[in-house]
Amino acid sequence: MHRRQPGDNVKYQLNPDAAFREVAGEVFVVTSDRALHQFTNATATTVFRTLRVGPATVGALATELGRHYEVDYNRALTDVSSFVATLVERDILAPISAPVGG
């Protein structure tokens, strides 16, 4: 079991204004500003596959990566937190709920 991190209850979803396509294990995203983003990393593909099923918290994404790649939760959490922040900045992901009491 892991300790809750700040922001654990913020869920993220794929931006509905962006187009997503997975081809041969790579993810391609076209955002509303017509920028093309390509993700070739298998862990990034796992994150996108998980989010395609539905919104998820950073903690849930880290747990999923831990299951797939047998990586330590805290290491996965650090990596996913950074990746999610980048995706939000690029308008690929959108937060859908604010932290309770925050």
Image (cartoon, helix red, strand yellow):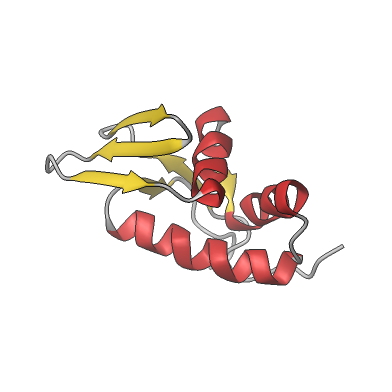
Quadrant occupied by the N terminus: bottom right
The front one of 44 and 63 is 44
Q: In the image, is residue 77 above or below residue 94? A: below
Q: Residue at x 50, y 31 (%)?
A: 52
* Figure disc tally: 0
Q: Give the side of residue 72 with respect to residue 17, left or right.
A: right
Q: Position of residue 27 (x, y in %)?
A: 39, 38
Q: In the image, is residue 3 above or below residue 43? A: below
Q: Position of residue 92 (x, y in %)?
A: 33, 46
The front one of 100 and 7 is 7
Q: Position of residue 5 (x, y in %)?
A: 66, 70
**Which residue is outermost to the left?**
33
Based on the displayed image, in which of its 4 quarters is residue 3 positioned? bottom right
The front one of 42 and 12 is 42
Based on the displayed image, in which of its 4 quarters is residue 2 positioned? bottom right
Q: Give the side of residue 98 with respect to residue 5, left or right.
A: left
Q: In the image, is residue 91 above or below residue 51? A: below
Q: Position of residue 86 (x, y in %)?
A: 36, 62
Q: Residue at x 59, y 51 (%)?
A: 57
Q: Give the side of residue 46 with respect to residue 5, left or right.
A: left
Q: Residue at x 56, y 67 (%)?
A: 79
Q: In the image, is residue 47 above or below residue 22? A: below
**Which residue is outermost to the right?**
1
The front one of 2 and 101 is 2
**Which residue is outermost to the front?**
24
